[in-house]
Amino acid sequence: MYLRPIHSEHDIPTLHALIEQVQLGVLVTALPGPTGKPAIQSSHLPWVLDIDIDTTDQDGDGDGEPAYGVLRAHMALANPQAKALAACAKEEDGWLVEHEVMVLFTGRDHYITPQFYTETKPQTGKVVPTWNYESVAAYGKARVYHPRRQPETSEFLDTQLHRLTDQAETRQTSLQTCWKVGDAPTSYVQRLKGAIMGVEIRIERLEGKWKMSQESGEGDRAGVVAGLMREGEKGEAVARIVQERGAAKER
């Protein structure tokens, strides 16, 4: 991720909050294919972030670094990326894939037209369109829970499916009654479980980017906020972040 200092976010709780808010992240891998050359693959997957782990020494080396958390998801066995992960997982290492992977989460975003720059555009005209957005990239190594790995895989998927469903039903819908995995026939769920595998990533580094007009002057930022406030609910949400980030810049 290209990170200018003015756009970088390093606060771990803030990065965690975006991951939990977005939930849907893109798993990106570059694993050796049949020819031995890396093949870039990606999949959109909903993730569960577990931060209830040792927050003082994640890797056990005694350096006291903060823990970044663990990401867990599942994917279809028929997915070529799942096949590549399973092929690279070393059973003797606990089904760990010794290649770094990335999960990219993109939060709120909006197009920024030059018309919003009420200070610079009238004065010089030296403005161009851009895009405001917030994103987090999580990096680490993937551990695979494949049907060949039992009973760990069955236990992992049982926990994952229930946690993922409960999380999504409470955060992503406004319904009064939440759907539960137990609402579906047990035989149906078991059959579907046989067609998926689990993925677990202990995060080794996190990068956050909040590109929210911090590079613009106060007058242009005010114009961006005013313009976004006219763009409906999506624009209003981004406008509030522009205000927050602008205020932090001025402090």
Image (cartoon, helix red, strand yellow):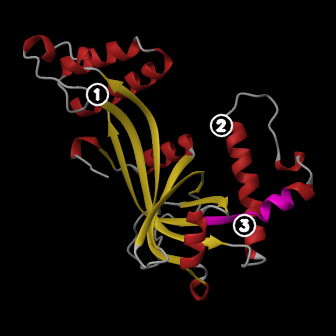
- Please say if the residues under marks 2 and 1 sit with CB atoms less than 8 Å apart: no
| Outermost residue toward the front in this view | 35
Measuring from the top left, give residue 96's x and y in whole percent.
55, 78
Q: Secondary structure under badge 2?
A: helix
Residue drawn at the location 85% of the way across and 61% of the way down: 191
| Residue type of the residue flagged with mark 3 | Phe
Residue 156, x across and y down, in percent: 72, 67
User: Which residue is pictured at 62% across the width and 72% down the height?
Assistant: 144
Q: Quadrant of the C terminus?
A: top left
Q: Which residues are magenta?
A: 189-199
Which of pointers 2 and 1 lies earlier in the amino acid sequence?
A: 2
Q: Upstream in the sequence, badge 2 or badge 3?
A: 3
First along the sequence among labels 3 and 1:
3
Give coordinates of residue 63: x percent, y percent: 38, 74
Secondary structure of the residue carrying tag 3 is: helix
Is residue 251 visible to the viewer in this orientation of the structure? no
Of the residues tagged 2 and 1, which is closer to the observer? 2
For residue 171, which numbered disc appears in the image? 2
Near-viewer residue (148 or 51): 148
In the picture of the structure, the residue carrying the numbered disc 3 is 156
Point 72% across, 39% down: residue: 169
Look at the numbered disc 1 and give the secondary structure of its residue: helix
